[in-house]
Image (spheres, rainbow, N blue to C red):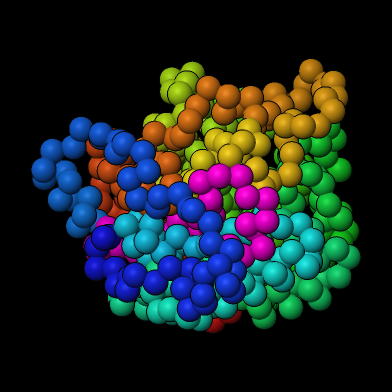
Amino acid sequence: MGRNKKWDGYTSWSYLEADRDYVKYPLEKQVDRVPPHDFGLDKSQEERVEALLEKNIVISLHEHLNVFPAERTPGVRRRPFTGYEGLAYSGMDAVFDNCVCSTYDQVINFLGMRQCDYAHQGFVVPALKVADITDAFKEGKVAVIQTIEQASAIDRDVDRIDLLFGLGVRSMGIVYSESNTLGSGLSELGDGGLTDLGYDAVKRMNKTGIVIDVSHAGDRTAMDVVEASDKPLCISHCGSRTLTDNERMLPDEVYQAMAKKGGVVGMEVAGFAPRTEKNPEGTIECLLEHLEYLVDLLGVDYVGAGPDTLWGDHAGLYRGGPIGTVRPRLGNGRYSREKSADLPEAFDSGEMVRDLDYIKGLESPSEFRNIAKGLVRDGYSDDEIAKVMGLNGLRVIEACWPK
């Protein structure tokens, strides 16, 4: 088990009777599903990693805490299974748990199911205020920051932002990869920028205390949000288009504007989008290369980690394979359209994962601690690692959430 974590063995819905109150699925393993990644650390370096995780608040800026079934089960999303065991091994003290639902009813179902499950155990605590995070760190628990990956569920009613905050949401993306009433997503051929409704939503999220995310926004929309926001924001799971020239990555000027506002960007690996010329395979080394580049560009105070992982066959999800519960998107099952030559390369998630089974070194949230191993190996100082592993994200949370 992870350092000082006090998981009591609870698993999702264990207060109910399996196969009477709910359908029990064979779930994927949360720990050791794939072989461990060797960073070549010696004993003293391994001890340093453990000491860093022990004394510093560790926060993942973007994960999906669902444990997926081992076989195709189309109805599984109605009742999400949380990876309590994996969280105990992860090294995290807090994590942004993301809901990708697009409709209001779907979001409410997800939030209600999550909160109901959490209420029957004591290891995972909903993070509603900053003290919930610091207390979880002290008490050997994990604070979950409930996040909605897109604001489509508010439709045209900004008052729903207040309602979602009241239901525990503390971070929200403006758009997913497709456009909505607030702005343009990264997969669209054109980017109309932040709409008037989107501008109102940004201001309301600032006032309410919701951390704003633009990881899936088009370039213009992302920049508009950065400029409109009165608070620091989070680009929770992304990378630099300078290293990886596809539309899933954002251009450096967006990150520079974000840093001037005091925000933070989290490096990702999911979707296998951040592969580079130096690291053409889908591994944790892609994340570490993007991290190093953006630390050099922005400074270490504005960079974190948001791997965007889950427990299960993530590559199969993008291919529409064993998980089989996600609608086709991003070029996987859509009609193709010719793009202008001046636009970045389209992000075809299905094609990205065709030759990959999993991300070596960051296969699931259980391996989040491996980022610290990579940073130790690559020569970062203790203070720099503490910032990247959590303190930068905590600073943004403190600036955005109500006091």
Q: Main secondary structure of the magenta part?
A: loop
Tell me if I can see residue 229 in this picture.
yes
State the residue at coordinates (37%, 78%).
Answer: 135
Q: In the image, residue 200 lies at what x, y percent?
A: 82, 65
Q: Quadrant of residue 165?
A: bottom right
Q: Is residue 175 magenta?
A: no
Q: Which quarter of the image is occupied by the C terminus? A: bottom right
Q: Quadrant of residue 123?
A: bottom left
Q: Which residues are magenta?
A: 53-80
State the residue at coordinates (39%, 34%).
Answer: 360
**Viewer-proximal residue, 391 or 300?**
391
Q: In the image, residue 301 lies at what x, y percent?
A: 43, 52
**Viewer-proximal residue, 149 or 358?**
358
Q: Which quarter of the image is occupied by the N terminus? A: bottom left
State the residue at coordinates (44%, 35%).
Answer: 359
In the image, residue 112 above or below residue 50: below
In the displayed structure image, the side of residue 401 where residue 104 appears, left or right: right
- All told, the count of numbered labels is 0
Q: In the image, residue 367 lies at what x, y percent?
A: 36, 47
User: Going by the picture, which residue comes out furthest to the left?
Assistant: 43
In the image, residue 161 above or below residue 235: below
State the residue at coordinates (11%, 45%).
Answer: 44
In the displayed structure image, the side of residue 291 where residue 161 appears, left or right: right
Tell me if I can see residue 243 in this picture.
no
**Viewer-proximal residue, 30 or 206?**
30
**Viewer-proximal residue, 387 or 114?**
114
Q: Is residue 61 magenta?
A: yes
Q: In the image, residue 17 lies at what x, y percent?
A: 51, 75
